[in-house]
Amino acid sequence: MPALALLSAVFVVGAEQIVSWKYGATGIIGLLLLTIGIKAKNPTVSSMGAVVLALLVAGPAL
């Protein structure tokens, strides 16, 4: 079980670093909102985070 928790933590930190490197502070805010919304089981906050991340990803195409 500790190996699974360690692997999960490494994945989360890695994903956070990739978002930070590619999308900057706005990406971190979107990821933070998404994470907080999921953990708090609040669909409004998680939806706001998902929309921020989607706009960042689709921004060049718009």
Image (spheres, grey):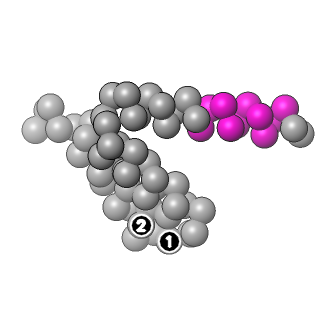
| Residue indicated by mark 2 | 45
Magenta stretch bounds: 3-12
Q: Where on the picture, by quarter, is residue 51?
A: bottom left
Residue 54 shows up from this direction: no
* Quadrant of the snapshot with the N terminus: top right
Q: Residue furthest front?
A: 25
Tell me if residue 26 comes above or below residue 59 in the rendering. below
Tell me if residue 45 comes above or below residue 8 in the rendering. below
| Magenta segment, prevailing SS (helix, strand or loop) | helix
Rate crowding at label 2 as few (under 14), some (14 to 19) or many (20 or more) other CA atoms within 10 Å.
some
12 displayed left or right of 24? right
Q: Position of residue 60 (x, y in %)?
A: 15, 31
Amino acid type for the residue under numbered disc 2:
Val
* Magenta-drawn stretch contains 4: yes
Q: Name the foreground residue: 58 vs 30.
A: 30
Q: Name the foreground residue: 58 vs 19.
A: 19
Mark 1 secondary-structure assignment:
loop
* Quadrant of the snapshot with the C terminus: top left
Q: Residue furthest right?
A: 1
Q: CA distance from mark 1 to mark 2?
A: 6 Å
57 displayed left or right of 5? left
* Magenta-drawn stretch contains 6: yes
Residues at discs 1 and 2 in contact (Cβ within 8 Å)? yes
Q: Position of residue 25 (x, y in %)?
A: 32, 43
Q: Residue at x 37, y 51 (%)?
A: 30
Mark 2 secondary-structure assignment:
helix
Q: Position of residue 2 (x, y in %)?
A: 87, 38
| Residue indicated by mark 1 | 42
54 displayed left or right of 61? right
Q: Residue at x 52, y 61 (%)?
A: 36
Amino acid type for the residue under numbered disc 1:
Asn
